[in-house]
Image (tube, rainbow, N blue to C red):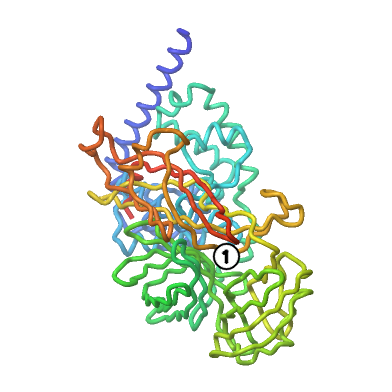
Amino acid sequence: MKENRIRLLLLGLIAVSAIIFFALYWNGQGNQTRETAAIPPSAGGTHVSKQVEASCMGCHAVDENGKLARIEYMRKTPEGWSQTIARMERLHGLKVTDEQRKQLIQDLSNERGLSLEEAQSVQYWLAEKPSHMEDQIKNPNLQNACMTCHAGGRFMAQRRTEEEWKNLKDFHLVMFPSIYLNHRHTDWPVVADAAINYLAKQYPLENKEWENWKGKNQQVDGKWKVVGFQGTKGAYVGDSEFMSTDGKLTEKKSVRYLDQNVSLQSTGNVEMYSGYALRMQYEQAGKKLRGTFNVGRDGKTITGDWSDASNPGITGEETYYKVQTEKPEIIHMEPRAIQRGQTQDLTLYGMNVKQLTAQDLKLPAGVSLKNMFVLSDDQVKISLAVDDAALTGASIIGTEKAIVHPKLVVYDRIDYIKVTPPYAVARVGGAELMHKVSTQFVAYAYSSGKDGKQGTDDDIELMPVTAEWALAPYPEGEKDEDLHYIGSIDSKTGLFTPAAEGVNKERPFTQENVGSVSVIAKYRYGGNTLTGKTHLVVTVPDYNNVIN
């Protein structure tokens, strides 16, 4: 025990000494160098960009390999580089203007970014999608050394050399010396070493997709068709146009919600990073929206997410399709699932649909087209007859003559409903500077598939359904005190809005408006009521110290 105390004391003294050393250095001579913009060009060519050299070479020297120390040994997303620059400003005295900061993020992302495939794997992280559940990372060292504080997206959104991954351990010990004590249940340095070895192999600096792509840029100017989905409001379709003027990219978009027949227009500024990553700032109906999108490899699609800046829990998912005039192209169908033994009307949305004929669609066995009525060049109604023996499941119905992106689903019956997100986190706010983070709950209908068993691999997701929503104590049988303080759920749409942050004097023991409840969805089908349930935690604001 005495040896452990001495070891902890020595580690603490080393960490404090390092912090004092860095503080004295950065606030002394290093700060003078960092503010000097007139840095001579490097002998071996420009390192990343002129702006990076001017802003970073006061501290990051060119090493024996002819590379800019630290910077040229890692790759990050635009968000990752923005956080790095913010840390340099906050802790190390970096002085840059807004325009210089913007240029730094642009240059670093273009030269030291991620490939499309790497970025797509952490889209949820970049878009800050609320209540998203990451795929389980089974490496125990990552779980114990990294994920006790970070989500997996934190390290999955960057690439480094082995040496740079190792530098993270020293960085944490210097910047967060309490990390050793916080992980006293394990030997954190040893576990961290094992985690770093895994990260170096799993997320190395070199990547063929990035090397083959770097320096290229997708061209998005022109007109696009849009299809999206917003929980609590449903599907929508629309039109978008990107325009470049004096080197600046802007977008105008108009969408129509199908269930509500409500149209919304938005305009915004667009930044492109790494040649494919689009970051948008919208104005829509008096609200500011933030968009995080990626252009596909073929340049014909754009996919991503948007969120409400004043309430990050209000979100939507969208896909853009480049407008073409060659053949019919269907981007959405409503409804997307049809039942055996019935004749159902479907509306198809897309482009060039006046050219669409019955022979252009390849319908599954047991499904026949009864009639087709063109409403416009981007909308057509069809009537499908489905016999009792039709094959169930999802089918591709497009052909060489017509592109159909959504699959047609045939089902026998609705067996159960499932509520998403399966585990939700909302955050109080709105009283001071912190925004509320609401949660959009959606109920999806499912068929149990051929085996008739719920929750097996052959289950078929059918469509979102209109349910009745309510809150209940969690766990069952507990007191319902939380229900009176945490906020409310719209019984028709499933939108949960949390209460205000801060101490509530009316609540016993002056607690905040936080708590844990069950969210219940009820859907009436065929004379029965199907029930779905999920868990909601309402907690404190996410106090992030964000500069940019």
Callout 1: few (<14), some (14-19), or many (20+) C-alpha neighbours within 10 Å?
some
Q: Residue furthest left?
A: 505
Where's residue 87, x and y in %?
36, 47
Q: Secondary structure at mark 1?
A: loop
Evaluate whether residue 250 shows in this view. no
Residue 387 in view, yes or no: yes
Mark 1 residue type: Lys
Image quarter where the C terminus lies is bottom left
Residue drawn at x 65%, y 89% as measured from the top left: 356
Q: Position of residue 396 (x, y in %)?
A: 71, 72
The residue labelled by disc 1 is 214
Of 338 and 299, the residue lying toward us: 338
Residue 516, quarter of picture: top left
Identify the residue shown where x is 29% and y is 60%: 97
Horizontally, is 546 left or right of 253 in the view?
left
Residue 322: quarter of image: bottom right
Nearest the eye: 227 or 199: 227
Q: Position of residue 496 (x, y in %)?
A: 39, 53
Q: Is residue 278 left or right of residue 340?
A: left
| Above/below status of 468 relative to 204 | below
From the viewer's perspective, is residue 107 above or below residue 403? above
